[in-house]
Image (tube, rainbow, N blue to C red):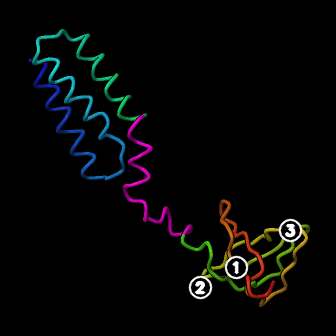
Amino acid sequence: MESAYWLIAFVVLAGIEAATMALTTVWFAGGAIAAFFVSQAGAGVNAQLTVFVVVSFILLFFTRPWALRHVNRHAVKTNADSLVGRQARVTAEVNNTLGTGCAVVNGQEWTARAEKDEDIYPPDTVVEISAIQGVKLIVKRLQEEQ
């Protein structure tokens, strides 16, 4: 009877993975199918649970890093991450010492800080976005201006 539970767990976990494609439950689905085969061999519940946990974590720790490198590797993490490398126009002086600065990119105004503390960018300067920290753009001089 326990084997039916493992098949149900496998189907549910595989279904969640298919729906989300987040690489979160597929490892446990593998553990459930391994536990199913152990239950078919007549092993007790403790052995089944042990196989489920061990196989799930082996799959998680040894195949997840490979899968993350090769699956969805071209996906942009967030919309904000896609701004890195793009240009923005300074609307309020960017001065890290004074803690001031705003820049507009794609019609949205962001708080902006200079990549180097000694750099100051006056309004209407076009800068390059080098990173995003929280809700702040980290900006630097355009490459052609350096």
User: What secondary structure is marked by label 3?
Assistant: loop
Residue designated by label 1: 128
Mark 2 residue type:
Gly
* Residue 8 screen position, x and y as percent: 15, 32
Seen at 61% across and 72% down, the residue is 84
- The number of discs equals 3
Q: Is residue 119 left or right of residue 3?
A: right
Mark drawn on residue 102 = none
* Residue 58 screen position, x and y as percent: 37, 29
The magenta segment is 62-81
Q: Is residue 79 magenta?
A: yes
Q: Nearer the viewer, residue 87 or 99?
A: 87
Q: Is residue 12 left or right of residue 71?
A: left
| Disc 3: CA contacts within 10 A as few (<14), some (14-19) or many (>=20) | some
Residue 80 in which image quadrant: bottom right
Q: Quadrant of the N terminus?
A: top left
Seen at 87% across and 74% down, the residue is 119
Q: Is residue 32 left or right of residue 88?
A: left
Tell me which numbered mark, 2 or 3, is placed earlier along the sequence. 3
Q: Residue furthest bottom?
A: 124
Mark 1 vs mark 2: in front: 1
Residue designated by label 2: 107
| Disc 1: CA contacts within 10 A as few (<14), some (14-19) or many (>=20) | some
Seen at 39% across and 35% down, the residue is 60
Seen at 51% across and 69% down, the residue is 79
Residue designated by label 3: 96
Q: Quick check: 99 above or below 28?
A: below
Query: How much space separates mark 2 and mark 3, taking CA atoms?
Result: 23 Å
